[in-house]
Image (spheres, helix red, strand yellow):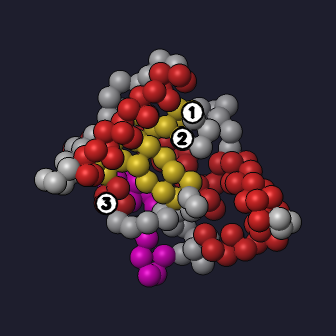
Amino acid sequence: MSYDLAIWEGPKPGSQSEAIAEYERRMDAMEAALDDPGGPAPATPAIRAFIDAALTRFPELDDESGPECPWAASPLDGDAVGAMIYFPMTFSGAEFARDPLAEIADSLGLVCFDPQIEQLLPDPDATPASTVSGRAYEALAARRGTAASTQRNWLGRLFRKN
């Protein structure tokens, strides 16, 4: 379970429905590229610039990572395919890193899409990542038949980097 973001190179969709359609199209293309016998295309210079800026702001996940590391997988550039990167964060990491990462993408002229809320970022009216995280904990707790607070503590230990 992770909190994911998609960053891509290209024109910014004009509406939420266009953003969702473009996200789905790009995810299908990314999956096809990953299945290509020749392997996926390397990150474009614009996506590489995003990765470099993101890693300057937040440290890469490794054995020494502390709570300031939002990533749920490593290396970050391993999640890039051509003109797109789709990467997972821990829920606790997304609470502090989602919006700064969206701002980095925006500053580089890239599109940032949050598939959890199906919304383009940055957006001051977007549902906070902490709200999405809370809903995920509650949904999992309901499915498992446990109290959300108990589930949140268990998941917090599992997904938080200490």
Structural crowding at the residue carrying mark 1, measured as other residues with C-alpha within 10 Å and reported as few (<14), some (14–19) or many (≥20): some
Relative to residue 160, is residue 83 depicted above or below? above
Q: As drawn, which residue projects farthest toward the left?
A: 38
**Residue sitting at x 76%, y 72%:** 153
Q: Where is residue 116? Give x, y as percent.
A: 59, 43
Q: Sequence-wise, which precedes: disc 1 or disc 3? A: 3
Closest to the observer, 51 or 72: 72
Residue receiving disc 3: 78
Query: Which numbered tag is attached to residue 119?
Result: 1
Quadrant of image for the C terminus = bottom right
| Badge 1 vs badge 2, beta-carbon distance below 8 Å | yes
| Badge 2 vs badge 3, beta-carbon distance below 8 Å | no
Disc 2 marks a residue whose amino acid type is: Asp
Secondary structure under the numbered disc 2 in the rendered image: strand
Q: Where is residue 131? Give x, y as percent.
A: 73, 48
Per the image, is 105 magenta?
no
